Amino acid sequence: MSFTYDYDDYYDYEDYDREENLFRDKPVPKERTSSGRHKSSSSVPLSDKGVIDSWYMREYVLDTTCRIVFTDSSDERIPKDNPRFRISDIASTENIYVTWDRDSAFIHSESGQFLAGDAASGMFSRKKDLALIEGLERLDVSKSRDMSEMFSGCKSLTSLNLTGWDTKNARSLKKIFAGCSSLKELTIPGFDLRNVTDASFLFSGCEALKALDLSTWKVRGFENGKSMFEGASGLETLDLTGWKSDLTITRDMFRDCTSLREIKSIGFKTGKVRDMSFMFAGCESLKVANLKRVDTRDLQSAIGVFSGCEELKKVDLAGFHAEHLISLGRFFEGCKSLQRVDLTGLDTENVTDTRKMFRGCESLTAIDLTPLNLESVCAMDEMFYGCKALESIDLSKAKTPNLLQNGTAGLFTLCKSLKEVKLPSSPLQAEYIRKAARQAVSVNNYRNRFRRDG
């Protein structure tokens, strides 16, 4: 499975007139409105650093800029004859300027020290040609609460060193590195993220990253982990040791991490997670998944959690107690190498949908469904579709009083090796399953068992 990220198509941004992005002849406004996203960050405590305004950065640093340099005004590299434009916040005690030199932008002030405002969101976003940022250690983000989309869409950026950044006041890191498809080196040790609640799309689309050790991050308050690593197709190893957070959303969290072989210690708390759908979907290289210690007490949706995990051979769901779970549809769909799955302890009392649950599990030879409570299940369409090696299925203890007649379509289609199906005790539901089996293979009825002819 190949993953292609088109960042502009994937994320929504406010429209703006690109023709107005020619700033050399555009006068610098002396002040901005006090409403919306143009609001002054005058609430930020002033210091001996100039307050740099992220809105001015987006407006006055060209989209075609290849290099941004944070420096002091005495830097000899700054062209003396080129015009400069003020990009500091109106509350700043020190003026900050930008001066262009071909494809470079020099951000400079007298002291060479810069304080990001309360909202640093989108400061470098959508600079598609930006390959290098120098002097990031001069940028103080200690007052910034919103750091969302800060580097998002920087497709040419290959490395970032954020050592020393003080992030203790950050509340949102949403999409901060999203779409940085060329990013290979990322140095971010010891981030203090105890106050961050939104980490959705954090590394989504970071296709060139191969390894991430985030064990030094201080994570306590993450709630939204949706698509956190989605599309990081080059990521092979990931260390989340030490994460202690009450996530509520992990949907698509590792989706399409096609090279991911190992996730070290999923230690974050999952007791409050309601939606885990497609969490590992498309992780083609993942071979073993142990969810024995994953707390799923509030889980409601688990659609396609492992769908497309083609190398997955073994899954342990022994501790997967989810009394509020409603859907298991497509849970293992496309797990071509899956040979064994332990369903003991899987609480399915309220599950209504198991459609395509094992669809395309070509290596499964037997499935024991006796531990499952299927009393609420209405639809089992294509549940075992394409299980080519499947020889026997035990449904003898399954109570399916709510199973609909049209809820068994394609149940055993392409189950070419199927020899035995033990039917449930309910005559009506047993007849629905018997008909589905007859549609798929040539069978004879023998004491509620189907045996393949020949």
Image (cartoon, rainbow, N blue to C red):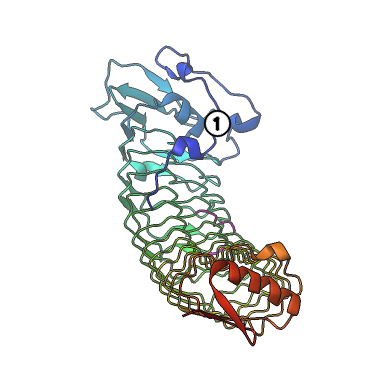
Q: Decide whether the magenta segment is chiefly helix, strand or loop.
A: loop
Residue extending farthest top:
25
**From the viewer's perspective, is residue 346 above or below residue 193?**
below
Q: Which residue is mark 1?
A: 91
Check disc 1: other Cα within 10 Å, few if <14, some if 14-19, many if 20+: many
- Using residue 106 as the reference point, say whether residue 363 is left or right of it: right
Amino acid bearing label 1: Ala
Q: Is residue 108 visible?
A: yes
- Using residue 136 as the reference point, say whether residue 391 is left or right of it: right
Image quadrant in which you'd find residue 235: bottom left
Residue 332 is situated, as x and y percent measured from the top left of the image, at 51, 67
User: Does the stretch in magenta take in 29?
Assistant: no
Stretch in magenta:
220-227
Residue 380 is situated, as x and y percent measured from the top left of the image, at 64, 66
Q: Is residue 48 visible?
A: no
State the residue in front, 247 or 84.
Answer: 247
**From the viewer's perspective, is residue 194 above or below residue 57?**
below
- The residue drawn where x is 53% and y is 23% is 16
State the residue in front, 380 or 189.
Answer: 380
Residue 95 is situated, as x and y percent measured from the top left of the image, at 44, 27
**Which element type, helix, strand or loop, lies under badge 1?**
loop
Residue 410 is situated, as x and y percent measured from the top left of the image, at 58, 63
Residue extending farthest front:
454
